[in-house]
Structures are given as structure tokens and as C-alpha cells.
Image: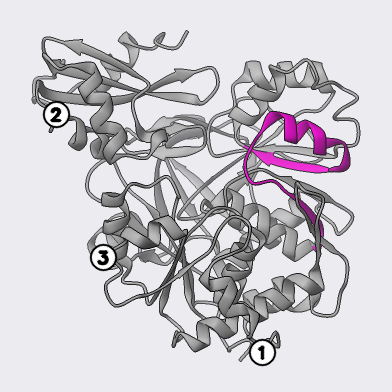
């Protein structure tokens, strides 16, 4: 039995010396060099006793070595679990208790305080140093992948709803491979491309969309540690494609240095993870002559739809279903309804949550997204809102209940309601409306101590009481209307 994901993404590059990645300092890595690192990383996993189905948690800064660990997990059948480096200690503790990893790779500072239980702990820095790198030094670089079936698990990505704790979305080899193949096809990605990669790699966008399509097509990366406007502008003339969240494009537009000449070499700009404002699309086109291609996806499904590479890219829409993916709106034609998705890209379910899986994933494969949308007469999909109160800020998901649980524990806060309202840079900004007599500085301090920075409210408002309907439910729609201009 072959290893479908490895055979498609990694194996074809074993004997190739073509460029894989260029780093900010000018250093480069060929595909052959990258595969050698993957081989050494796989042997470290073997030496640590990992078996197919074991979980590996990776919580480190972005590096080529981190990507190699992902590929090594792919080769060995180990389930890869990336975590945001911004997570606080209480958040990380939950993920460790839920995923029960056999091995954890983190930065040296985190390793000093983490409660790893029975897991083996290695360290890795952004510059590729640490105990994992030391273990790789003496490891051989030969790489024979283990047999895996298409339905075998490849990764967990943690998501959550507006209530309860985070859920581990179980993604299979076929989920990841089918999605990469569809995207390479519709976006016309070839080995001649160079992708400017400024996204984080703990997120589906930066890892599975950007890295998997790069590996499948055999193209090159300009591998930046994060989005920095000056660095992006410096490297952009050597790139042909760029993937980003709307914030990236608004920040580029704020720079006079970002001109038509700067973008002249580019073939394609892609945006996702948050809604792209029509105004941003128009300004970008006027400035560069390029029309950003917007697509739609989520943790549980990868990408579902995309505006076309050739043909009309309609502002405000997320385009057409990807090849092999079915999308339906549970409403009469042209009306707004719940969006459901079915296809080889749809996840296997939530880790250790059979009831939640049954609630959102039907026996015949339809996944209820929680998004509301409508198709136009030409089959373009528009997302008009979310059934749940999820906030998407700068491409990251913020779940109000998690933030509210922190704020409600602060002295002086009787009750809180967390909402998302339009933000010119992040798409949506997190706003907290507090009932009671809280001290705002104390509230902010509590949020910073317990929550990743992007989850912390950017605006705080105090009211006598929160608005409720006759059933006693807080009317968040009314709050969003009241504070819609908070960031204007």
C-alpha cells in the first residue's frame, strides 16, 4: 500500500536540486536539501518511539525545519497537530490534555514551563536550533515512507464553536491531497511559480493551502517569518504569486512604495480567511492592475470555492465550487440559507467528540458550515453572515464564549458580550460590551494574561445591562448594529 500524500507531495522531489525556499537572509534550500532534512526528522520520530496514529504537537516559530517535521509526520503516519505560538499557558494545557501527544516540539522558553505529561519534549527555534536539530545531526537522511490509506489521519487542526472548548478537526491524507490538487488546477500553479509566503504555518491557510500546493506543483517559496510590509515589498518583484489575508492587502495599499511597477512581475494575488472588502478590491485594482482572487474555506474542509483564474472575479463573492466539491445552500434558489459542503476535502470528524461530529457531519457526507450564503444566477457564492457568532479578525477565528468566560471572571464585570464589527485593517475587530462597573485596565490585563493577543478585545464599552429578547437571550445583532462604527 502506498502513502498517497507523501507520494504526491514529497517523493517526486527526492532527486531534484531545484530551488525550494529562499530565506530573508538570502540563504536558499533546494528540494534535495529539504528532503534530506525531512529524512533526518523522520528518523528522530522513530528514535522517539512514535508509531502511526500517535500525535505530535508543534508549537514553534516558522522555519523550514518546522515544515520538514510536518513532512516527516506525513511519511511516518504520525498525526501532525500545529498550535499557534500566541496561545497562553491555559490554552496550551487544554490542547495537550485533549490531543495527548507522544511528542511535543516547542521553543526553548516554553519547554521550561510546559506540563508535558508522558510526552517527549524537543525544542526548535526560528533559526533551526534546539534539541530537535541536535538530534537530527547524527540521523541518517534516507527516507522510506510507511504505507498509509487515503482515509488515514494526517493532521488535527483545532477549531471551536461559539460555546464549549476547542474541537480537533481530523483531516485525512485524502482531505489534504484532494484539496491541493484542486487548487493547483484552478489557480494554474506550476513549477515556474515563486510563492511569497508570509503566512503563519500553524494555520490551514499557510500550511495546507500554501505549502501543500507548492510541494505538489514543485514551485519555489520566498519564505518570510511573518508579514512585514517592507520585507514583502523587497521580495515581491521576485515572486509570481502571493497568498494572504485581507489585512496584508490593506497594509500594502497604505504604502506609497506599493506601485504598479512593484507588482508587475506578479501573476496572482489570492485572499482568504476573512472577508475582502469591495473597497479594498477596487483600490487594489486601481493601484496595481491586478484583481485579487478571493476564495472560501474553513478548517474542517480546506478550500471549498474560488473565484476563477480566467473569467470574472466578482467582488463580494467567493466564487464557484472547486472541482470535486459540492456546495449547497439550504434555501430556495437565490435565497439566503445555511451553507453545506460535501466532497473529498471534508474532514473525518471531531477528535473524541462523536456527538458534535454527528451534529455537524451527516451520514451521507454533508458538513454544516455554520455560514449563511446565497448563490447568484451564475453560480457564484456570496457569504452573507454566520449562523454562529464567530469573529474573524486578520484571518484568525475568535470564539466569543471563550473570551467572555475570561472577562466574566474579572471583578466588576457582571456579564460580557463579545462581538465582531467592521475593522478597516483586520476585516473584523473584537469588541467587548461589559455590564456592571468594571475597570477597563483590569479587564485588558486579564485578557492579555489568558488569551492570545488576537483574541483580546480592541474596544471595551460599559453598559448598565445587555439587551435581551423575550427568551432572555443576549441580542448580539443589536450590539453589532450599535457598535458598528467603533473602528471608523
User: Marks 1 and 3: CB-CB under 8 Å?
Assistant: no
Left or right of 459 on screen, residue 233: right
Within 10 Å of the Cα at label 3, are there few (<14), some (14-19), or many (20+) other Cα atoms? few
Q: Earlier in the sequence, mark 2 or mark 3?
A: 3
Q: Nearer the viewer, residue 230 or 397?
A: 230
Occupied quadrant, residue 235: top right
Can you see residue 227? Answer: yes
Residue drawn at 50 percent across, 57 percent down: 60
Q: CA distance from mark 1 to mark 3?
A: 32 Å
Q: Earlier in the sequence, mark 1 or mark 3?
A: 3
Left or right of 84 on screen, residue 101: left
Q: Earlier in the sequence, mark 1 or mark 2?
A: 1
- Pointer 1: what residue? 144
Is residue 480 within the magenta segment? no
- Pointer 3: what residue? 97
Q: Position of residue 121 (x, y in %)?
A: 40, 72
Is residue 242 within the magenta segment? yes
Q: Position of residue 478 (x, y in %)?
A: 27, 15
Q: CA distance from mark 1 to mark 2?
A: 54 Å
Residue drawn at 30 percent across, 45 percent down: 161
- Pointer 2: what residue? 410
Per the rendered image, the range of residues in magenta is 218-244
Q: Position of residue 396 (x, y in %)?
A: 46, 39
SS label for mark 1: loop
SS label for mark 2: loop
Q: CA distance from mark 2 to mark 3?
A: 26 Å
Q: Nearer the viewer, residue 214 or 411?
A: 411
Q: Position of residue 390 (x, y in %)?
A: 36, 35
Amino acid at each position: 500500500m502506498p502513502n498517497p500524500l507523501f507520494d504526491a507531495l514529497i517523493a517526486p522531489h527526492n532527486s531534484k536540486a531545484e530551488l525550494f525556499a529562499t530565506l530573508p537572509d538570502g540563504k536558499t534550500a533546494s528540494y534535495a536539501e529539504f528532503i534530506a532534512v525531512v529524512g533526518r526528522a523522520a528518523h528522530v520520530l522513530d528514535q522517539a518511539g512514535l508509531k502511526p496514529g500517535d500525535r505530535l504537537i508543534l508549537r514553534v516559530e516558522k522555519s523550514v525545519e518546522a515544515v520538514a517535521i510536518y513532512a516527516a509526520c506525513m511519511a511516518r503516519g504520525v498525526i501532525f497537530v500545529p498550535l499557534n505560538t500566541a496561545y497562553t499557558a491555559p490554552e496550551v494545557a487544554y490542547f495537550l490534555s485533549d490531543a495527548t501527544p507522544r511528542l511535543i516540539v516547542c521553543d526553548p522558553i516554553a519547554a521550561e514551563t510546559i506540563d508535558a505529561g508522558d510526552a517527549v519534549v524537543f525544542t526548535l527555534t526560528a533559526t533551526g536550533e534546539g534539541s530537535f536539530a541536535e538530534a537530527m545531526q547524527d540521523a541518517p537522511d534516507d527516507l522510506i515512507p510507511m504505507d498509509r490509506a487515503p482515509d488515514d489521519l494526517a493532521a488535527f487542526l483545532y477549531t471551536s464553536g461559539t460555546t464549549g472548548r476547542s474541537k480537533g478537526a481530523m483531516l485525512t491524507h485524502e482531505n489534504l491531497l484532494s484539496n491541493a490538487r484542486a487548487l493547483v488546477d484552478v489557480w494554474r500553479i506550476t513549477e515556474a511559480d515563486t510563492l511569497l509566503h508570509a503566512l503563519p504555518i500553524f494555520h490551514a491557510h499557510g500550511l495546507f493551502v500554501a505549502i501543500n500546493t507548492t510541494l505538489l506543483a514543485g514551485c519555489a517559496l520566498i519564505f518570510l517569518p511573518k508579514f512585514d510590509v517592507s520585507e514583502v515589498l523587497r521580495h515581491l518583484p521576485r515572486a509570481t504569486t502571493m497568498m494572504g489575508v485581507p489585512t496584508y492587502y490593506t497594509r500594502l495599499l497604505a504604502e506609497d512604495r506599493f506601485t504598479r511597477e512593484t507588482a508587475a512581475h506578479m501573476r496572482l494575488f489570492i485572499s482568504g480567511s476573512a472577508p475582502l472588502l469591495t473597497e479594498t478590491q477596487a483600490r487594489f485594482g486601481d493601484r496595481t492592475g491586478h484583481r485579487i482572487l478571493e476564495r472560501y474555506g474553513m478548517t474542517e474542509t480546506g478550500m471549498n470555492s474560488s473565484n476563477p483564474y480566467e473569467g470574472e472575479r466578482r467582488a463580494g463573492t467567493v466564487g464557484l465550487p472547486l472541482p470535486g466539491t459540492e456546495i449547497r445552500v439550504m434555501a430556495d434558489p437565490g435565497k439566503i440559507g445555511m451553507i453545506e459542503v460535501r466532497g473529498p476535502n471534508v474532514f473525518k470528524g471531531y477528535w473524541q467528540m462523536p456527538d458534535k461530529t454527528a451534529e455537524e457531519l451527516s451520514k451521507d457526507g454533508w458538513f454544516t458550515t455554520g455560514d449563511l450564503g446565497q448563490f447568484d444566477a451564475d453560480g457564484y457564492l456570496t457569504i452573507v453572515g454566520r449562523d454562529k457568532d464567530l469573529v474573524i479578525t486578520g484571518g484568525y477565528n475568535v470564539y466569543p464564549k471563550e473570551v467572555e468566560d475570561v472577562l466574566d471572571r474579572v471583578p466588576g464585570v457582571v456579564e460580557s458580550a463579545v462581538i465582531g464589527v467592521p475593522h478597516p485593517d483586520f476585516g473584523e475587530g473584537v469588541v467587548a460590551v461589559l455590564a456592571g462597573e468594571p475597570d477597563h485596565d483590569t479587564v485588558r490585563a486579564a485578557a492579555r494574561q489568558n488569551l492570545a493577543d488576537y483574541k483580546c478585545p480592541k474596544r471595551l464599552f460599559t453598559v448598565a445591562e445587555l439587551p435581551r429578547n423575550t427568551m432572555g437571550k443576549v441580542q448580539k445583532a443589536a450590539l453589532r448594529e450599535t457598535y458598528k462604527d467603533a473602528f471608523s
